[in-house]
Amino acid sequence: MNKLYILFFSFLLLIFLQIPVVKTKIVDIANNIKIELSTFKTFIKEKINYFSNQQQLINDLKKENIKLKKEVAILNQFIEPCKDLKGFKIINDSNLTFVKTISYAALPDFTQIYINYNKPISIPRGLVYNNVAAGIVVKNFGNYSLGLLNSNKRVTYTVIIGNREIPGIFKGGSFKVEYIKKFLPIKIGDIVKTSGLDGVFYKGALVGKVIKINQKKLYQEAIIKPFYNKLTPDYFYVVEKNDTIKKIGGKNGLNTN
């Protein structure tokens, strides 16, 4: 009996579903369900892509942050030593290389220093401090070089004296300018500058002031008071190779403004 009821109601349902209005309504409902499922699926995909992109963005930002931290650390290596530069003038010129003193080279000799200059040296190169000649760099040892201050007797370079630019040779240690021709007029108070003709300095770096003149048999010599008088050597510029010197120098020397 139950089977007959089931068959009877199944037959009625089949007839009911064949009614055009009912059939159309069922198709519409099915289509709506299909659209809703498709929309929900698209929504899920978009959310997954959004979170994936966010994760990629986070990863990219982490990498960029690590890169920036490394760059800041490198900059700090340069900035930290410069905090105590005091009166040292920063000169932005490709013909000069900024260096700092590492240590004294041969204590108790305070006239020789090691600096963090890592370029080969074929001829001595000038050391300047605020456009003042402080000494020369004479030898490279890879990552550092040997510098001799004006107070070292091995230091020598060509100079000019006074407005007439009378030539002579500066001798370190004794602070003398030697081999000045006897007939050329020099006087106490004349300013001594580098000539730049020997390739060690550019023209016009200040060296000192004449305080005494000695007459020799064949030439004159001038005793000078040097302008570089720091007790503790710290920062300098190294004058680069000779073919760039003319670009920095000139009648009035280097412009440090």
Image (cartoon, rainbow, N blue to C red):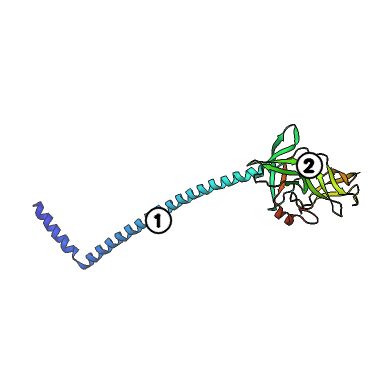
- Which residue is denoted by mark 1 in the rendering? 46
Residue 86 image-quadrant placement? top right
Is residue 63 found left or right of 41 in the rendered image?
Answer: right
x and y percentages locating residue 58 in the rendered image: 48, 49
Give the label, 2 or 1, closer to the camera.
2
Q: Nearer the viewer, residue 253 or 86?
A: 253
Q: Residue furthest front?
A: 218
Amino acid type of the residue tagged 1 in the rendering? Glu
Amino acid type of the residue tagged 2 in the rendering? Asn
Residue 229 image-quadrant placement? top right
- Asked whether disc 2 touches disc 1, contact meaning CB atoms under 8 Å apart, the reply is no
Q: Label 2 vs label 1: CA separation?
A: 74 Å
- Say if residue 198 shows up in the picture: yes
Is residue 1 found left or right of 74 in the rendered image?
Answer: left
Is residue 229 found left or right of 41 in the rendered image?
Answer: right
Please count the marks in the image: 2
What element does badge 1 sit on?
A: helix
x and y percentages locating residue 30 in the rendered image: 27, 61
Q: Residue at x 70, y 55 (%)?
A: 243
Classify 10 Å Cα crowding around label 1: few (below 14), some (14-19), many (20 and above).
few
- Which residue is denoted by mark 2 in the rendering? 150
What element does badge 2 sit on?
A: loop
Q: Residue at x 85, y 47 (%)?
A: 179
Q: Which of the two discs, 2 and 1, labels the residue nearer the N terminus? A: 1
Residue 69 image-quadrant placement? top right
x and y percentages locating residue 31 in the rendered image: 28, 62
Q: Residue at x 11, y 56 (%)?
A: 7
x and y percentages locating residue 108 in the rendered image: 75, 31
Q: Nearer the viewer, residue 205 or 223?
A: 223
